[in-house]
Amino acid sequence: MDRYHHAIEEFHRQWEPYGGPSPEAVFTEFGLTVNQFYARHRALTRGRRRRADLDRTCADDAARNGQSDPQR
């Protein structure tokens, strides 16, 4: 993850307990509208969820095949 994506993730995490960032805060920090910000955040988390699902699937397959290390 590059710095920009990390900054989006961290900014979202900081504002989440307060109901999300204001449009002004998003624009000041990233130069984006709130809709653009959330679209980018969704794209980041969607990709991470897909990788996690794939990791789980590989681990399940390895367990079914009697392998303790799915990386083998």
Image: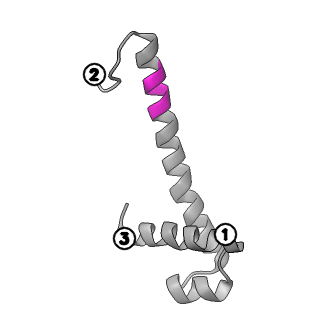
> Between disc 2 and disc 3, whose residue precedes?
3
Label annotation for residue 17: 1
Q: Residue flagged by tag 2: what amino acid is it? A: Arg
Q: Residue 72 bears which disc, if any?
A: 2
Above or below 17: residue 32: below
Q: Earlier in the sequence, mark 2 or mark 1?
A: 1
Indicate whether 6 appears above or below 71. below
Tell me the crowding category of disc 2: few under 14, some 14 to 19, or many 20 or more residues within 10 angstroms, Cα based: few
| Type of amino acid under label 3 | Arg
Name the element at disc 3.
helix
N-terminal label among 3 and 1: 3
Residue at image coords 41%, 10%: 65
- Magenta segment: does it hold 46? no
Q: Is mark 2 on a helix, strand or loop?
A: loop
Percent x, y of residue 44: 51, 58
Classified by dominant secondary structure, the portion drawn in magenta counts as helix
Badge nearest the viewer, 2 or 1: 1
* Residue at 43 percent of width and 26 percent of height: 58
Give the class, few, some or many, for how many residues have Cα within 10 Å of label 3's Cα (few <14, many ≥20). Answer: few
Residue 38, above or below 71: below
Q: Disc 2, disc 3: CB below 8 Å?
A: no
Q: To which residue does mark 3 refer?
A: 3
